[in-house]
Amino acid sequence: MSHHAILTAAGLSAAELETGVDADDAIIVSSPVDGSKLACLKPTALAAMPDIIGTAQQAFLAWRTVPAPRRGELVRLLGEELRAAKHELGALVTLEAGKIRSEGLGEVQEMIDICDFATGLSRQLYGLTIASERPGHRMMESWHPMGTCAVISAFNFPVAVWAWNAALALVCGNPVIWKPSEKTPLTAMATMKIVERALARFGDAPAGLLQLVMGGADIGDALVCSKQVAIVSATGSTRMGSIVGPKVAARFGRSILELGGNNAMIVAPSADLDMAVRAIVFSAVGTAGQRCTTLRRLFVHESIHDQLLDKVKKAYASLPIGNPLDAGTLIGPLIDAAALQHMQQALAQASHQGGKIYGGEAVTAGVPGGAYVTPALVLMPEQSEVVRHETFAPILYVMKYQSLDDAIHLQNDVPQGLSSCIFTLNLREAEQFLSAAGSDCGIANVNIGPSGAEIGGAFGGEKETGGGRESGSDAWRGYMRRQTNTINYSSQLPLAQGVKFDF
Ligand code: UN1
């Protein structure tokens, strides 16, 4: 299928792809598949932002009074439309973000899953009933819509992360303004067409309930700094989060931050090594190492180190690298040339810090252009500075350990805290890893790699990962405001704590 055919199938017309031809600040969208230009887009004017935010606020005033199960109906319809468009949108994810076909489709499936989840949730926004200490009183908690939710998303999950936020925000009664990465605005535009179909079938949603803005940091900043934006959900680098978080906090807004990860696996002596190898390979090289959950650090018990490494090296040598649009490819391109440069810089530092590098070379033969690499395995003598830093590329640092206590300590001894896992068949080791004294990450798995989480769990992490939680479990609470209600149905007015104030 040609690029043109993929764009057309996703509903993007030639005119829509060329809106920026006369603009000085046009967003040029290139395909990581071959570096070819896909579009030249006019960014949203900064001057238009107050109106866009104002429209969302008007939508909020209407949407917050729509019963939650009815709001869920819109999300159910969105899920249906996504099912119908899965193939087309998945192919566009591959074209614009460079993921292999199966992962492009998986990303759309993640959108569908969260729609299903949120539809059910729309009938389950439960509050507690609380025992009052006073006679004739009842206490309860109500959860109310919060206000406009800005979603700032990254290139690597160009549509799923919006869906995690939007599906929850919608059932919780909030409008959404989406600012996608400048590297992947086309998947966002195509998603909005799917949204339009769901809205048309729904019938009476307020105008401006779901909006898309496009641009760089200035457009993001307009959302981050507006008092009318109740929630800012931002996914991206720790650097970005360190700018967004304080600005939102300074105006007492709420932020949901999903930032850098530096995810680890511990492979213990009892591990099923063949299973561990499968998990290592998928989580270290899948999405060309560009998931925030990508496996970046591997701690292997010294007794099985060489054996495991041989297996991983063999597996690495067998991985088809190439055009992600071709069936059979497992490693597609990095997002752009800058990413390749960052990878090479990190490898140079690793070598300087005593690392022994296998792979990590640029691939130019047999690929259609773009920034392709062989995944790198780096044997590190210790967890030095480069290992503590997240490089968004397929680099796996491998280190030996002797005692599990040391391995857990090293695993936690980085600034980030997103995802982690242990491969062991030893119950004591597994439970120690999951205990309060174990992994300090938001996600900790046993006999499963650190990436590829299901939507049913809360997704996010601690420390420099930002502390936010999105997606499943009770992450919905982050999109609502909590109200404590005390109702007196007696004819007296007793005070709490037995305080007397008679007059
Ligand atoms: C991300 O990389 O920003 O757990 C999200 C995973 C995916 C989501 C990753 N479900 O790898």
Image (cartoon, helix red, strand yellow):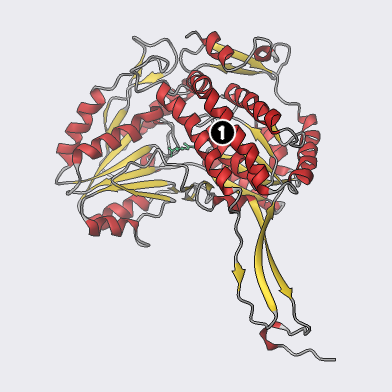
Residue at 44 percent across and 49 percent down: it is 415
Q: Quadrant of residue 185?
A: top right
Residue 450 locus on image (x, y percent): 36, 42
Q: Which residue is drawn at 22% across and 32% down?
A: 312
From the Cβ of disc 1, is ligand 1 less than 8 Å away?
Answer: no
* Percent of width and height locating residue 202: 69, 33
In the figure, is residue 393 to the left or right of 170?
Answer: left
Picture quadrant of residue 326? top left
To which residue does mark 1 refer?
79
Q: In this view, does 134 lie above or below 83?
A: below
Q: Is residue 427 visible?
A: yes
360 on left or right of 210 = left
**Where the C terminus falls, by quadrant?**
bottom right
Q: Nearer the viewer, residue 229 or 490?
A: 490
Image height check: is 96 above or below 353?
above
Q: How many marks?
A: 1
Give the secondary structure at mark 1.
Answer: helix
Residue 305: x, y in percent?
18, 41
Q: Which amino acid does label 1 sit on?
A: Gly
Residue in the picture at 68% in, 14% down: 16
In depth, the one of 469 and 118 nearer the eye is: 118
